[in-house]
Image (spheres, rainbow, N blue to C red):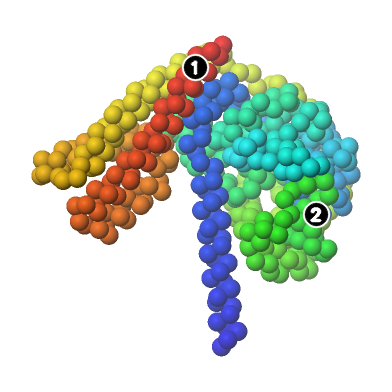
Amino acid sequence: MKEVMKEMKDLLSRGRSRAWLRFNTINRGDAVKVLDNLSNILVHRQTAEFHKKFQGKAAVIVCPGPSLSKNVQLLKELKGKALIISVLHALKPLKAAGITPDIVIHTDPQNLKAVFREENGELVSLYDHWINKDELEGVSYFVTSSSGSPENFDIPVKEVLWMSPGMRIGAFLPLDLFDYTRVGGSVSHSAFDLAVEFGFSKIALVGQDLAFSSSGGLYADKAELDLSAKRVASMGEKFQVKGFYDDEVTTNTAFSFFAQFYRHFAKQVNKETDTKLFNCTEGGIYLEGFNHISLENFINNEIKGSMADISINNIFKSVIRDEKKYIKDKTKLKRFIKDNIKLGNEVQRLSKAAMELAKKQYHSEEDLRRFDLVQNKTINKLTKNYFYTLGLQKEIYILKAGVAADNSTRGQLGFHLDFLKAVVNFNTKFVKSFTKQLSLVSSNG
């Protein structure tokens, strides 16, 4: 009985951890940040422009798992025969092996310039650590997120492209925006989603261990990721799962969570497309839905003799920007921005008026009636832009829970006042962001 109870407790613990990871995965992108990139997504090409352009071709997604050292040298044989997509954290191991990927992808919303690490006794930003001319030399394309840091659109490569992974926000912007929906919590899932939509007939994973190595390592040499005890502990408990070679390997809650998404996506892709999926990691966790073979066998059996050499640059060059559409998009975007600046000013005026009424020490029936009227007008204005809902989701939840729990006039007004303060703070950033974007969009040719 004790063993059964322990197993139930372990399952519940993993369930809570996975639920929390999923919550963070969905919300960490903070879709509101796309408003700071309106000028960037107008000027830079969207990855969706290249959907289905790589049909009949192969793609290899490189991740920084500890097994990468086993077969990294073989990737040289794929140059020009398959598109090599590297997540940013796998770039250094690739460059150290003399391999330059065709695409580097980093869709994490984190501002790398605001996060520092110590190197040789000095604090260096992760932007300077990961994104520099030496590491990116020869890389043609860098893919970032529409909701990422604006700094990620200023990368020393031939061209920066963008995608919109995460929440479905395309319907709430005046531009044609493709929402990528295979969100699994890691950048490698974004790379996988991209490869599927690009139309590749064969997609292979390399260095996607999602497990500890036999010596306890988490990442490949030179990946230089945070291996502090605090971070490793934050990834959840360790446990045994089926491995690449039908053995048992050690994973953790976070990695197991990512693996589950890969299995789910593989099931979907295998059912709906003719794309063949391969796991060529040669170590780590077993991923149902993928063919598990060595990278050498993948090259010999799936690439050589069956896939013609491809010119990556020619495929990308074949898609030419429609200048007429660009001009129309620019006009629509400027109108959208101006309308939202006007909306923001109205929200600010109404919010402050409602706050003044809520702050009164004593409230007559007329005061309460006027407060309800102004508050309702404020909320009605907030519904005019979905990004208010996204940016205030926590405060909306607290307001609903609070007024349901405390039905006294003072208590209800208190919760409304806290909500209005949050509205004013968010709206100030909202208007500031749109004002800046209007200047940037207007200055673009």
Per the image, the residue denoted by label 2 is 66
Residue occupying image coordinates x 54% and y 28%? 37
Task: Point out residue 368 in the picture as x, y percentages from the top left corner.
Answer: 15, 43
Work out how far the residue at label 1 is from the one at label 2, CA to CA, in angstroms. Answer: 46 Å
Between 17 and 47, the one lying in front of the other is: 17
Quarter location, residue 211:
bottom right
Residue occupying image coordinates x 65% and y 66%? 237
Q: Is residue 132 visible?
A: yes
Going by the image, does 177 lie left or right of 97? Answer: left
Q: Is residue 279 above or below residue 115?
A: below
Classify the position of the N terminus by image quarter.
bottom right
Task: Point out residue 336 in the picture as x, y percentages from the top left corner.
Answer: 41, 23
In the image, what residue type sits under mark 2?
Pro
Label at residue 439? 1
Label at residue 185? none
Residue occupying image coordinates x 47% and y 36%? 32
Task: Point out residue 118 in the picture as x, y percentages from the top left corner.
Answer: 75, 43
In the image, what residue type sits under mark 1?
Ser
Question: Which structural element holds mark 1?
Answer: helix
Question: Which structural element holds mark 2?
Answer: loop
